[in-house]
Image (spheres, rainbow, N blue to C red):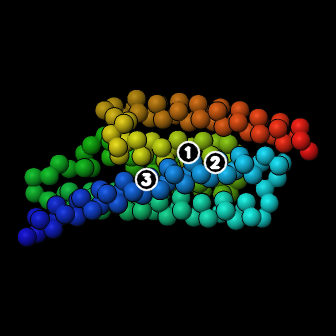
Amino acid sequence: MMVSLLASSIVILALTHLAATLVGAGSITVAEWQYFRALSDGRIDDGERSHLVTLFFSLRFALILVLLTDIALGFVLFALPGAPTLSLTISYWFEMLIVLTLIFASWLRFYGHIPFWAGSATAFTGWWYLFGINLGYIPVSNFGAAVIGFIINIAIIAALFGYVRFLVREQSTKYS
């Protein structure tokens, strides 16, 4: 009976975790798109700001849910006899590193310690990495290589977002 309950808990937690990463990746994508759209007229008005605040609330909710389900999964798998120990996998610790990076980058960005582009690129890359890992599209077999790949992808996204911001600002000054 207890083993069945724990096994069912694993399925529910895994699906909740996947749904939370999907909400996070989807929210950051919509937030970036809305940000670029808001910049197209050269400024962010109150309605656009309100929409972005709502999106960032969903990102915080998804981040808390991912963190809690990761921790709960670790405990449930530890308690289930014969289950693999999640805390011993490279993928688990890399995922926790991404979650902590998202928390830290959000805090730094909120208090203005890092530029917007750095926080934006880190959040976008982090959420899509979490979703990709959970779907199995980003295999993690070496922690160091995964971290280097993550940093390189943040740099690529930062460059792409910088170019899009340049194009949007160029377009907004052309029509103002």
Crowd tier of the residue under label 1, counting other residues whose Cα lies within 10 Å: few below 14, some 14–19, many 20 or above: many
Q: Earlier in the sequence, mark 1 or mark 3?
A: 3
Residue 111 at least partly seen? yes
Q: Seen in the image, is 91 located left or right of residue 174?
A: left
| Residue ranking furthest to the right | 176
**In this picture, residue 170 sits left or right of residue 141:** right
Q: Label 1's element? A: helix
Residue bearing mark 2: 32
Q: Secondary structure at mark 3?
A: helix
Give the percent coordinates (x, y) of residue 167. Answer: 76, 35
**What type is the residue that disc 3 sits on?**
Thr
Q: Is residue 62 above or below residue 2?
A: above
Residue under the point 11% across and 65% down: 4
Disc 2 from disc 3: Cα separation: 16 Å
- Depth order, front residue of 82/156: 156
Q: Which disc number belongs to residue 21?
A: 3
Badge 2 vs badge 3, beta-carbon distance below 8 Å: no
Q: Quadrant of the N terminus?
A: bottom left
* Above or below: residue 99 compared with residue 174: below
In 3D space, how far apart are the residues under numbered discs 1 and 3 (Cα atoms)?
A: 12 Å
- Secondary structure of the residue carrying tag 2 is helix
Q: Residue at x 27, y 58 (%)?
A: 73
Give the residue furthest to the left: 1
Per the model, the C-alpha gap separating discs 1 and 2 is: 8 Å
The numbered dot on residue 124 is: 1
| Residue 93 visible in the snapshot | no
Amino acid at circle 1: Phe
Mark 1–mark 2 contact, CB under 8 Å?
yes
> Could you say where residue 108 lies in the image, as x and y percent from the top left?
63, 53
Rendered-image quadrant of the C terminus: top right
Residue at figure coordinates x 84%, y 48% from the top left? 42
